[in-house]
Image (spheres, grey):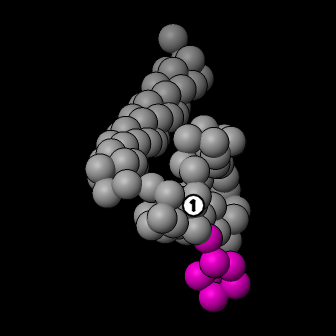
C-alpha cells in the first residue's frame, strides 16, 4: 500500500500537474497493482492537505470536486464497459448470421 511507503501533503492543490492523466490511468490501466497505487495517490492528493496553506472552505471544495470526479469516472467506465459488451454481442450475432447458409 502506498500509505506505508510515502507520505503526501498537498500545499497548493491548484499547482498540481498531471491530474487528468492520473485519473485516466486509474480507470484505463490493466495492471491492477498500478491501478491500486494510482487510486491511493489520487485519494491522498485530494484529502491530505497542509492545514497552514489550504483553508477549510478550499478543502471542502476540493473534496466535493473529488467525489464528483469519482462518480463521473465510474459512470464513464460503466458506460464504456456496457458499450464494449454490446459491440461484442452485435459482432457475434453478425458473424453467426453471415456464416449461416442461405
Q: Give the x, y percent position of residue 30.
A: 67, 56
Q: Is residue 83 left or right of residue 57?
A: right
Q: Give the x, y percent position of residue 88.
A: 51, 34
Q: Nearer the viewer, residue 101 or 58?
A: 58
Q: Nearer the viewer, residue 68 or 27?
A: 68
Question: Does the magenta-highlighted stretch encompass residue 45?
Answer: no
Q: Quadrant of the N terminus?
A: bottom right
Count the numbered circles shown.
1
Does 44 sit above or below residue 28? below
In percent of the image, x 51 and y 11: which residue is there? 102
The stretch in magenta equals 1-8
Which residue in the rendered view is the most extreme toward the top? 102
Q: Nearer the viewer, residue 78 or 15?
A: 15
Which quadrant would residue 24 be assigned to in this image?
A: top right
Q: Give the x, y percent position of residue 95.
A: 57, 25
Q: Nearer the viewer, residue 17 or 84?
A: 17
Q: Dot 1 lies on which element? A: loop
The residue wearing badge 1 is: 10
Does 59 sit above or below residue 88? below
Q: Is residue 18 left or right of residue 98?
A: right
In percent of the image, x 57 and y 60: which residue is there? 10
Disc 1 residue crowd, few under 14, some 14–19, many 20+, Cα 10 Å = some
Does 34 sit above or below residue 72? below
In percent of the image, x 68 and y 79: which residue is there? 6
Q: Is residue 93 visible?
A: no
Q: Of helix, strand and loop, which mostly describes the magenta segment?
A: loop
Which residue in the rendered view is the most extreme toward the front? 52
Q: Is residue 50 left or right of residue 21?
A: left
Which quadrant would residue 18 be assigned to in this image?
A: top right
In percent of the image, x 63 and y 88: which residue is there? 4
Q: Give the x, y percent position of residue 27.
A: 55, 49
Q: Is residue 7 visible?
A: yes
Amino acid at each position: 500500500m502506498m500509505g506505508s511507503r510515502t507520505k503526501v501533503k498537498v500545499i497548493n492543490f491548484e499547482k498540481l500537474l498531471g491530474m487528468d492523466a492520473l485519473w485516466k490511468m486509474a480507470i484505463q490501466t490493466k495492471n491492477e497493482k498500478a491501478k491500486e497505487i494510482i487510486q491511493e495517490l489520487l485519494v491522498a492528493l485530494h484529502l491530505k492537505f497542509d492545514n497552514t496553506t489550504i483553508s477549510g472552505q478550499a478543502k471542502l471544495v476540493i473534496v466535493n470536486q473529488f467525489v464528483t470526479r469519482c462518480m463521473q469516472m465510474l459512470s464513464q467506465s460503466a458506460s464504456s464497459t456496457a458499450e464494449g459488451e454490446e459491440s461484442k454481442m452485435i459482432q457475434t450475432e453478425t458473424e453467426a448470421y453471415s456464416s449461416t447458409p442461405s
